[in-house]
Amino acid sequence: MLDVYQKLEKIVLKQFISNDLYVRHAYSRNVDVALQGVPDIVIRPRDAKEISEILKIANTENIAVIPRGAGICEFGGSKPIGDNGIVLDLKRMNNILSLDEENLIVTVEAGISWAKLNEYLCHYGLYTGCMGPGSGMSASIGGGISHHSVGGGGCAKYGACTNQLVSLEVVLPTGDIIETGSQANRYSKQPFNRFGNGPDLAGLFCGDNGIFGVKTKVSLQIFPRPEFAAYKTFQLPRKEREVSAKIMSEVRRKGIDVYDLMYIMDLLVRVGTQEGYMPMWEHLKKKRGVIFYTVEANSEVELNEKVKQLDEIMLNNKTELLGAEISDGNIAKWHYVEQGHWQFYHNLWGMYPSMQALTAECFAPIHRYPSILNDIDQWDMEHAEDMQKISEITKIRPIAGSGPILLIDGNNVEITCGFTSFWAFYNGKVHKTIEETNIKLWKSLLERVTKQGVQWYMMGDFMSRLMVDINAYSEEYYNLMKPIKEIIDPKMILSRGKFNFWGDGKRV
C-alpha cells in the first residue's frame, strides 16, 4: 500500500492523509458496539476534483473506498467491511456555498452538519424543515441524504430530509462528476428544481447508503420558520401503544398540519427517571408512556385552531395533560424551544454506564407499530437465555425495546428499535462471549423486524447484506440493483460489500 499512499499524497496536503495505526483504528468504528474494520489509509479531500482523482487511483489499484461523513451511523455504514480500503473523510467539505433567499434554496458542501447549517439559517429566520437525523448535531448533510434520514425534528410536517432535495453534485465511482436536477442543464445558473431534464437521477443517490456515488454538493429547499408555535405533552392511559397509534391516525385523517408528534414508551420513562437522566418525569406517580405534539402557525388564530383540534383528540383518547413548563414534564417544549431534538432522539443509548444500543431504524405504517413493538417484547422473552450470557458478566441485563415512535410524512412512523448491550471490552477484559452474543442477537432481531414488512432506511453493511442473505428482496428487484451498480462502479470499489456487491474484492 506504500505505492498507493504516495500517489494519494500528491492529491492532498500531507496533513490530510494518514496510514498511522492509531488514526486508522479511530476510523474503524461507527456507533455500534459490534462491528469493526480497520482501513489501510484515511484521507480528507477538500473538493469534488480531489475526490475524483482519489477514485481514479482506487480504480486503477482495485482498492475499496468508503465515504464517511460524521461517522455516527449504525450498522457499520461508514467503515470498511473487514480490514482494508481507503476511508474518504468528508469533514473538510463543510462550507455553505450559497443562500438563495429569493428561491429559498441553500447550497452546501456535503460534509457540513445539520446543526451548523441550521444555526446559519436561523439568522435569516429560516430552517431546513426536516432538521435531519436525531444525531444532527454532528451528522452530515450528505449522510442524511444517503439514508433518507429523519428524527431531528419537523418530520411529521416535512418528512425525510430527501423530500427537500433540489440537486446534487456527485462524484461517481469511476471519478466522473455529475450534477442532477436543474443543474443537469449546463446553462442553469443556480439550482431551482429537482424534477425535469429527463429522469430523476438524484433519486438514485437518495438512500443509496453510499454505493452509487460520493455526494459532494447538496442543494436543499429551505423554509421560513413560522412566528407562532405551541407544544404540549400528555401522559397516555393503559394500552398506550394502541392509543398513541390511534391518536396519530386521527391527526392524519383530520388533516392537521402538525410539526412533530412523538410517542415515548413507558420503558424509557421508567428507566430514564430511575437512572436520573429524565428528572422532568420524576414527579409522575405512574411511569406510563407520554405523547407530545408541536405545531407551528403564521398567526395566533391559526395556532389556536390547531391546538384546539389536537387537544380535542388527546382528550377523547383519555390522555392527561402535563404542565406547560419543562419542569412539569413538558418535553415538547424542551424538544422545540431548547432544540433538545439532537440531544434526545437516541435515548436508548447510555441507559446504564458503558451500554450502547444495537438499533434498527425503519419506517412502518402507523397502524402496524403496536404489533411490531409487541413482537419485539416477545423476541426479548424468547432470547432470555442469550441475554443471560451477557448479564452473567456485566450484572445488568440487556434491554430490548424502542426509542421514540416518530410520526413522519404520510401515515407512517419511524421506529428506532433494538436492544442495549455492552462492548466486548468490559471491566478491564475482552469478553468474546459478549461480542458473539451481540452479533447473534442483533441479526436475529433485525431479521424478525424485517419479516414484519418494514422499510429500512439506514442500512450500512450489516443490514444491507442481511436483506440479501435472508432473501428479503425479490429476485427481480435485486437483479435490477446489481447491474446498475456494475455499470456505475465496474470494479465495485465504492462501499464494497454493501448489499453483497463485492466485485473482485475479498468477501468477509
Image (cartoon, rainbow, N blue to C red):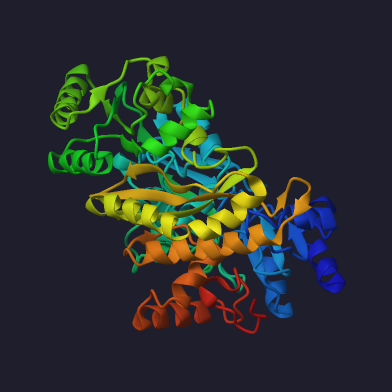
Say which quarter of the image contains residue 309: top left
State the image coordinates of residue 386 (x, y, percent, origin top left): 54, 60
* Number of callouts: 0
381, above or below 229, in the image: below
State the image coordinates of residue 441 (x, y, percent, origin top left): 52, 61
Which image quarter holds the N terminus? bottom right
Taking the image as drawn, is residue 376 in sight? yes
Q: Please report the residue visible at 57 percent of the width from the left and 39 percent of the height from the top.
A: 350
* In the foreground, 324 or 276: 276
* In the foreground, 276 or 60: 276
Q: Is residue 315 left or right of residue 488?
A: left
118, above or below 89, in the image: above
Say which quarter of the image contains residue 48: bottom right
Which image quarter holds the C terminus? bottom right
Say which quarter of the image contains residue 299: top left
State the image coordinates of residue 456 (x, y, percent, origin top left): 40, 60
State the image coordinates of residue 466 (x, y, percent, origin top left): 49, 71
* In the foreground, 114 or 450: 450
Q: Please report the residue visible at 28 percent of the width from the left and 49 percent of the height from the top.
A: 370
Taking the image as drawn, is residue 210 in sight? no
Q: Is residue 427 left or right of residue 487?
A: right
